[in-house]
Amino acid sequence: MQVRLVNTSPFLDQKPGTSGLRKKVKVFQKTHYLENFVQSIFDTLEIANNSVLTLGGDGRYFNAQAIQVIIQMAAANGFAKVLVGQGGILSTPAASHIIRKYHTLGGIILSASHNPAGPDEDFGIKYNTPNGGPAPEKITESIFEKSKTIQQYKLLSLPAVDLNTIGLTHFDGFSVEVIDPVRDYADLMESMFDFAAIRNLFSDGFSIKFDGMHAVTGPYARELLINRLGAPAHSLMNCVVSETFGGGHPDPNLTYADALVKIVYGTDAPEFAAASDGDGDRNMILGKGFFVTPSDSLAIIAANAHLIPAYQQGLSGVARSMPTSGAVDRVAQKMNIPCFETPTGWKFFGNLMDANKVTLCGEESFGTGSNHVREKDGLWAVLCWLNIVAAKKQSVEAIVKAHWAEYGRNVYSRHDFEGIPTEQANAVMTHLKTQFKSLPGREFGRYQVAQCDDFSYVDPVDGSVSTGQGIRILFECGSRIVFRLSGTGTEGATIRIYLEAYEPDTTQHHLDAQVALGEMIQISLQLSQLKENTGREAPTVIT
Ligand code: VG1
Ligand code: CO
């Protein structure tokens, strides 16, 4: 079998964003496009003759075709072996675990996360390094540089590998192993949590509903919740992976997981409910008629981590992305452990975890995780909550309310304005940047501005600097407004406004977040001139 060198021309494209390269499927299907990007990844690696590559994706449209191409390219570029999930499936956290467990030279994950799937929708690809985490900026930048000068890519013409059958296929000096995508991950979960306690919870009749949103977590949830923990089969909904994610938008939040939300707020609601996203790294946690904000979820998991076997020894520290609420900061302060504030995106947590500076971390965007892998992990968060509920024998709502009573409540909401023409979105950000220096000291009703900046971050481990990570307006009372442009969309721009107000007074804790944040919402619109610049009257998504 011979390596084929295919001539190509550089593609000047955007840099990989918050989480890899995301484009319309039609773009990835263009001649040489996928191959150029994969070759650019391989060109940044030192591939040895025993190097192994982990490969898998969220099962969306184009996943299986892309996998066959990447296998041929891995063979031609000198990998000894590719480990690929059966059916081409690996959830993002499971891929991270496989990379770590089998010490592979990183992995390629095919996913556009919660973005819709199908021939006219999105596809995505990202490289994770041997620590299991998303490539840090210096690597994504060098991939981008390679993609600007690429002249050739390498392929080895191999017969298509049967992705549906577990087993090893040998070629000349190269092999492909199709592995069970669930088992290693499920074993890891079983080693971390008190499965006996959770099993008892279910056998005592505790009811749960898990929504896989037709995406990758279906088989994982079935193995964990039904097979290993004994929940009844009707606890699952939308748990068969479909190429189009059932035509939906697998983003576990109150807007897109509306089918589950209806159940949770209806009669006969289960005591616990959860959903996960396209690639299985996000989570939404709900109790009976009750929504847990992701920022609170992180804080509550941190405060109760000692109840979970894997964290009985305590936490070395915690981290949150800048826009995430400060609820976890209060827990860290009380526990007397460090708390780090990083830019948005999981790649910034990796160094902190590798250096054992943090055990838990999270983002407001329904992402929570720990150092068991180097990605956020949806089902892990579900198991954290089930373990905590089993240990405390309290409802989700009671646990959250007790937490607020002890620490105060960081009332929080994010308003997304999606699909805005790029020039208009840039105008909003420029407007904010030109005026933020003059804001400190100004008063808006009872809110006085204390500090404004464009967030930048110095990595405490390797000293790398990331600038332009979002405009922060901090008020004297501890409330905050943050403005950021999304880095994961494929159409136009999305402006995210993150709103937070600290409320120590328990008599106010019953308030709906949108009501409690009413004044802050008005201030954010006034400061950004968002309506004037974009013509938008209301956000497209509120979480
Ligand atoms: C969004 C979230 C961010 C998250 C990223 C990837 O990025 O805000 O917190 O890390 O998605 O999540 P952005 O740049 O659009 O705000 V996933 O589940 O799509 O890999
Ligand atoms: Co995701």
Image: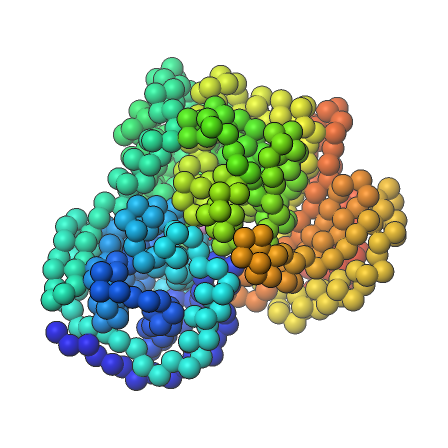
* Residue 358 against residue 424 in the figure, above or below: above
Residue 88 image point, x, y percent: 27, 54
Residue 72 image point, x, y percent: 22, 68
Determine which quarter of the picture holds residue 121.
bottom left
Residue 240 image point, x, y percent: 31, 43
Residue located 15% across and 77% down the image: 2
Residue located 57% across and 43% down the image: 319
Residue located 67% across and 57% down the image: 455
Q: Is the N terminus in the top left, top right, bottom left or bottom right quadrant?
A: bottom left
Residue 232 image point, x, y percent: 32, 25
Q: Is the C terminus in the top left, top right, bottom left or bottom right quadrant?
A: top right
Left or right side of 69 for 489: right
* Residue 479 against residue 224 in the figure, above or below: below
| Viewer-proximal residue among 478 and 533 | 478
* Residue 204 against residue 512 in the figure, above or below: above
Left or right side of 217 for 471: right
Residue located 46% across and 66% down the image: 140
